[in-house]
Structures are given as C-alpha cells and as structure tokens.
Image (cartoon, rainbow, N blue to C red):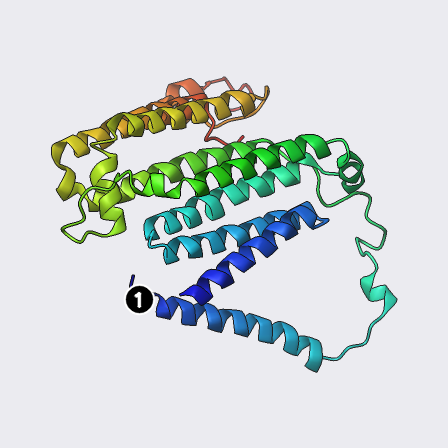
Amino acid sequence: MNYTEYLPIFIFIVIAFSMSLGFALLSGFVGPNKPDKEKLSAYECGFEPFEDARVKFDVRFYLVAILFIIFDLEVAFLFPWAISLSLIGLTGYFSMMLFLLILTVGFIYEWKKGALDWE
Amino acid sequence: MNLFFFLFSAIIVLSAIAVISSRNPVHSVLFLILAFVNAAGIFVLAGAEFLAMILLIVYVGAVAVLFLFVVMMLNINLEEIKFQVKKYFFSGLFVGLILLAELFFSFSNLDLIRNKNVMVTNSKNLTNTHQIGSIIYTEYFFVFQLSGCILLVAMIGAIVLTLRKRPGVLRQTVSKQIDRKKEDSIEIIKFKNNNAN
C-alpha cells in the first residue's frame, strides 16, 4: 500500500490537534486566573436550577435520526454502484433500481404517514 | 505504518476503557466516537478505504448521533446505574466471554478465511471501491436486495413504533388553500341604508 496520499490529511490532523491543544493550554497559562467560588456556582436567572439539563424530549427527534440513518445507508450503497457502473452492466443497473424501488416504497409510506412533517 | 497501527489501536483500547468507565454517559458516547474514528484509521491502514469512509459516515455521522439521542432520552440517573452494576455483572460477563470466544475462534482460523479466495481477480488493478461495486450488485444480488428489505423493515418499524398523531393540531393543507375560491370565502351583502337620503 502507498500511503503518500494521506500525508496532507495527516498534516492537517497534526496542525488541527496542536492548534486546539495550544489554544486550550495557552489560555490556561497566559490568561488571568482569579478563581472565585461564585464563578463556579450555578446561575439560572439568579436562583439554583430546578432540574437536570437532561430532560426527556420528543421521540420525534429519534424518528428523524433513524430515517436519516436509513437514507444514509442507501447513499452508501449508491456510491460504489456509481463508480463501478461500467463494470457491472445492465444487471447491476437494474439491481440498484430494484433496491431503490424497495426503499421508495418505504419513502412513500413515511411521506403519506406524515412522519416527515413537524407539527 | 506500524507506528500508526499502534497509535490507532492504543487510542481505540484506551477510549474503549473510557467508554465503560466514564461517569457521564454523554462522555461515554464521545469516547465511542473517538474509538470509531480510530477504527476507521485502522481500516485505512489495512487498505480498506471504502469501509473506513463508510464507518465515518454511518457510524460517526449517524449511529453516534442516535446514541446521543438515546442517552439524552433515557434520562439516566448515575446512582441507579452504579446500583445495578452487580445485578448485571454475570450476564455481562457471559456476553463478554462469548465475544472473546468468537474472537479467539476467528483468529485461530485466519488461514481458513484467507485461503477461501473470495476475491475476484484483481488483474485490472482496481481500487477497493471498484472491487466492492463490481460484485455486490451482480454476484451478491439477493443479499443486496435483502439489505434493501431490511432497511424497509427498519423504516416502517421506526415509524410504527414512534409516530403518534396528536389531535387538535392545526396544519396547513396546501391543496385546500389553493382550492379555495372567492365565492366560498367572501359574501357580499347589499343592505338598504334607511338613513341615506
């Protein structure tokens, strides 16, 4: 394997990592440091918070995430199909069309069911 | 490349330990994302670029977000989890032992897998993604369609389980708006004005 193509990515990662680390460390060392108990205390309109920030929220967000994953996987299947279309011929083409048809059935179902609408 | 392999695998092992030992479940999910990213790095080192990118797109981009949602939605109480550690210890140990046995089995039979010669001839010096694409849609036609059916089932299942119609929600119906005519909505009433001259 030849990994020279990954050298720019590696340089990018090293620079990004060292810069973010540098900012975090420098602000800790150089910035003024006057610790105060009041700075750490909770502030929510002047009184203590009533509950945890982690509250139960609408299950609809979860549904949107699941539907996103499914179409994400569909696109993941489309990618190797698109670049190897010249190798697989008509069989491969119609194979993918059948796959898309199956998923389009689900897409029409969720559209008609109103799963994509937000009330 | 050995250096990178050790780097990636060390980060994977450390972040996996952090996943199960960190107190905040959100931190656990973030460490899990770190493990996914480094697993993608190992895939790249193994020459499986397509799998690496799919790992990033699907697992980091979508599954990790789903995990974060679940962690947020479960409203986890940390004290309760610590209380339940003993309760789930033996079942967890059992699952872990099964996984370890499977790993051991597959590593002891590596030669069997390698000699199977699944790969089609790589005479044209194709890339990884080309090779996957050249067999998955034709030679593995039924498995491919089966994966489509599984996605369909997952889609319908998620909708059936989570979609609740709320009564009394005001909703815009575009066709109704367009169908509305002037005669339906405006009524002109002529009335006599007695005071007029």
State left or right for residue B48 relative to residue B37. Answer: left
- Judging from the image, mark 1 belongs to the subunit labelled A
Q: Is residue B177 visible?
A: no
State left or right for residue B87 relative to residue B125. Answer: right
Around disc 1, counting alpha carbons within 10 Å, would you say few (fewer than 14), some (14 to 19), or many (20 or more)?
A: few
Residue at the spot x=81%, y=76% of the render?
A: A34
Quarter in which the C terminus of chain A is drawn? top right
State left or right for residue B131 relative to residue B76. Answer: left
Q: Which residue is mark 1?
A: A5
In the rendered image, the residue lying farthest to the bottom is A30
> How many numbered callouts?
1
Tell me which amino acid carries mark 1: Glu
Q: Is residue B146 above or below residue A84?
A: above
Q: Is residue B158 above or below residue B57?
A: above
The foreground one among A104 and B102 is B102
Quadrant of the rendered structure where residue A33 is?
bottom right
Residue at the spot x=78%, y=40% of the render?
A: B82
Which element carries disc 1, helix, strand or loop?
Answer: helix
The foreground one among B158 and B197 is B158
Residue at the spot x=72%, y=34% of the render?
A: B89
Residue at the spot x=63%, y=51% of the render?
A: B17
